[in-house]
Amino acid sequence: MKKQDPRRNTPAPSRNAESRSANHTQVVTQVAAQVVELAGLRRRLASLLYEGLLLLGVLALAFLVPYLLLGVVFGIAPAGWVAWLHIYVVLGAYFIWYWRRRGQTLAMQTWKLRLVTADGHAPDVATGWLRYTLAWPSLLCFGLGLAWALVDRDRQFLHDRLAGTRIVLLP
């Protein structure tokens, strides 16, 4: 019987390389299967509010400045649907870039939250766009998708439930 390592609750590694590789796989599997704590509703809502403040700066830079230049320099006023499409793409690029990079936007970093998929990894681009797209009606329908968290068994927002993502609390 192998001696137990009290820090990891796994057998102590043996000397040969094959056994070390198998042991490393077991430890990695245990870490990946680790139960994480889902973030609380108040913390997620506070992060959402803070995110809204940060998005004002993103929109000022990536939306307001170009539209002012188009209007003043060229006298062009794009159609309303073009403006909404521009907002959708700019905000989508912001969220997807941060979610793919570390699973956290700036506000999520502040509140120690991370967006993960069911297997515990950062979402891929398709999952990120799905979550982002589903969040629009969740917010614009009077916050109905956010209120869903009050009846959800895991207290997750509706767009997280549908996209297969969750927001977890970091240690």
Image: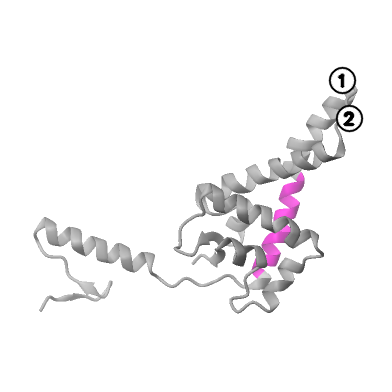
Asked if the stretch drawn in magenta spans residue 6, the answer is: no
Indicate the position of residue 63 as horizontal and vertical percent values: 77, 37
Q: Is residue 153 above or below residue 118?
A: below
Indicate the position of residue 35 as horizontal and vertical percent values: 43, 73
Residue sitting at x 24%, y 76%: 6
Majority SS type along the magenta span: helix
Disc sitting over residue 85 in the figure: none
Depth check: 68 or 158 in front?
158
Indicate the position of residue 67 as horizontal and vertical percent values: 83, 31
Residue sitting at x 72%, y 68%: 146
Write down the quadrant of residue 154 in the picture: bottom right
Q: Is residue 147 left or right of residue 3?
A: right
Q: Is residue 96 above or below residue 146?
A: above
Disc sitting over residue 77 in the figure: 2
Callout 1: SS? helix
How far apart marks 2 and 1 lie (CA) works out to: 9 Å
Q: Is residue 53 left or right of residue 130?
A: right
Residue sitting at x 63%, y 75%: 155
Indicate the position of residue 137 as horizontal and vertical percent values: 75, 59
Callout 2: SS? loop
Residue sitting at x 80%, y 32%: 65
Please report the bounds of the magenta region as a residue range: 43-56
How crowded is the residue under tag 2: few (<14 C-alpha within 10 Å), some, or many (20+)? few
Q: Is residue 59 left or right of residue 101?
A: right
Q: Which residue is mark 1?
A: 74
How many discs appear? Answer: 2
The amino acid type found where label 2 is placed reads: Ala
